[in-house]
Image (tube, rainbow, N blue to C red):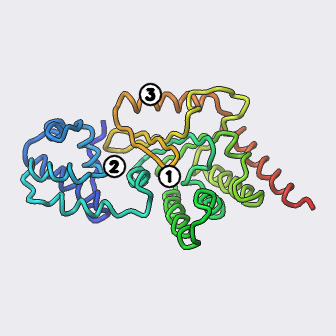
Amino acid sequence: MPGPRKLDPSSSPRALLGAELRHRREAGGLSQEELGAPLFVSGSFIGQLEAGTRRMQVDQAQKLDEVLGADGFFVRNCAALKKSKYPDHFAEAAEAEREATAIREYAPLLIPGLLQTESYARAVFRAYQPTATEDVIDELVAARLDRGQLLTDPTTPLVWAVLDEAVLRRHKGGRAVMAEALRHIAALVHRHRVIAQVLPFSAGAHMALEGPLKLMSFAGAPPLAYLQGLGTGQLQDDPATVRKYELTYDLVVADALSPQASLALIESVAEDYDHEDQQP
């Protein structure tokens, strides 16, 4: 198992808290499991706090100050973690995404946020909030595009997306928007920046029919699974639960078209949208 990842305490509030938590725990001679016990959390959860992959809650900060004799350090700094440009149900997952070394995702209806174009994201957010002001939509789109900056690194994180065929076929924003969005994914594949597969309608029933699934792996912390519903989302860190979702993803991959066949289908559907848009 890899050793704990070295955190830059200046990079984010979570990195600061994680580095300080690890320092104080080790100085106190406590294992992660021993520190987790009075908080009623697992040792792996403490490891995730230290690695910056989980968000510290105020009640946890209060207990850590008490157990570690931190004189209110964690409570004072925990407030900074509450500031996020993402919805509450997704904020922790978005923060974990930035720390991940690998992100694997099954998308049943929408192009994953990391892979979206500006026009596609705008169409999606407008559908979510039909009466919102343009300023609100602009802020949501900017936050989504900021997530996509993860892909400016040529290799990390590994991003592997399985798109249900419905992602390609259901219009969001019109044919031109869809053609651009699919060509963007194809370009990322051609640059060897992402792996993309399509789960065709012909695959029939499969293990992830109930909704989207995101898996995140980290260099110095256990993996996480993120499940999202209508205005809700939840990170799962229980090892047995995460393994179950990893199996789900593996079986979806097994049912999907090969990367080569998937790329051909993505480009073909993009061409169809182009041709349809050009028809009188």
Query: Between residues 22 and 210, which one lies in front from this camera angle?
Result: 210
Q: Amino acid at mark 2?
A: Thr
Q: Secondary structure at mark 2?
A: loop
Q: Is residue 216 left or right of residue 125?
A: left
Residue 194 vertical position relative to residue 184 in the rendered view, above or below: above
Q: Which residue is mark 1?
A: 155
Q: CA distance from mark 1 to mark 3?
A: 27 Å
Task: Please give the name of the residue rendered at 29% of the width and 57% of the height, measured from the top-left corner.
Answer: 14
The percent position of residue 190, horizontal first and vertical second, equals 66, 51
The percent position of residue 271, horizontal first and vertical second, equals 81, 52
Disc marking residue 218: none
Pointer 1 or 3: first along the chain: 1
Q: Amino acid at mark 3?
A: Lys
Task: Please give the name of the residue rendered at 52% of the width and 57% of the height, measured from the top-left corner.
Answer: 151
Quadrant occupied by the N terminus: top left
Residue 214 vertical position relative to residue 73 in the rendered view, above or below: above
Q: Residues within 10 Å of mark 3 (few under 14, many from 20)?
A: few
Query: Between residues 162 and 71, which one lies in front from this camera angle?
Result: 71
> Residue 80 is drawn in which quadrant?
bottom left
Q: Which residue is mark 2?
A: 53
The percent position of residue 247, horizontal first and vertical second, equals 49, 27
Q: Amino acid at mark 1?
A: Thr
Q: Secondary structure at mark 1?
A: loop
Extreme-front residue of the structure = 131
Pointer 1 or 2: first along the chain: 2
Q: Is residue 211 left or right of residue 169?
A: left
Q: Which residue is mark 3?
A: 244
Task: Please give the name of the residue rendered at 41% of the width and 29% of the height, measured from the top-left corner.
Answer: 243
Q: Secondary structure at mark 3?
A: helix
